[in-house]
Amino acid sequence: MLGQRTLLRFPYLTLQAGEPVHHLLSRNEVKTMSAVTVYLPEITDVERFVNIMSRFPFEATLVVGSYSVDAKSIMGIFTLDREQPLRLEVATTDETSLHALAEALGTYLCNPVH
């Protein structure tokens, strides 16, 4: 049963709020990652987030409402309404990259956008 505070949504499993990322990683069940919800309210959050995303070779998009931008673009992110959570969509099925992304995003993860 899914709780109200889902952090990561995977096609076949879910990481609940308060559950450490290493629990997800130790399950060794990750197949693909479709989307994660992140919160970037401060300018420094955006800078750090872009630095994290730039380390990954796959395409990533931030979506809020009907707007979407490249998740590796500082200027693009600043055009979004960052007062609310943003949906990060990634285009990869590489398990190693997904594990690394989940670890790197740690503090920026939040509840999903409904």
Image (cartoon, helix red, strand yellow):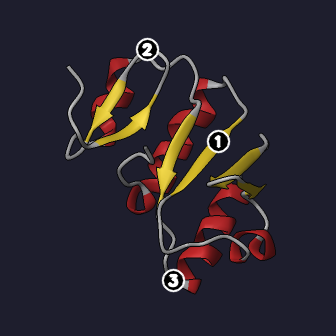
Query: How far is mark 3 from mark 1, CA to CA?
Result: 21 Å
Q: Decide which of tag 2 and tag 1 comes sooner along the chain.
A: 2
Q: As drawn, is 106 to the left or to the right of 55? A: left
Picture quadrant where residue 21 is located: top left
Counting from the top left corner in percent of width and height, residue 50 is at: 68, 66
**Horizontal and vertical percent for residue 26?**
33, 25
Characterize the local packing of mark 2: few (<14), some (14-19) or many (20 or more) Cα atoms within 10 angstroms.
Answer: few
Measured as percent of width and height from the top left, residue 66 is found at 70, 52
Where the N terminus falls, by quadrant? top left
Q: Which tag, 3 or 1, sits closer to the chain's start?
A: 3
Tag 3 residue: 42
Q: Are marks 3 and 1 in contact (CB under 8 Å)?
A: no
Q: Which residue is mark 2?
A: 12
Q: Which mark is residue 64?
A: none
Q: Nearer the viewer, residue 6 or 24?
A: 6
Amino acid type for the residue under numbered disc 3: Glu
Instruction: Please state which of residues 31 and 2 is positioned toward the viewer in this rendering.
Output: 2
As displayed, is residue 12 above or below residue 52?
above
* Badge 1 amino acid: Glu
Q: In whole angstroms, how far apart are the C-alphas of marks 2 and 1?
A: 16 Å
List the residue tagged with mark 1: 89
Q: Residue at x 60, y 48 (%)?
A: 88
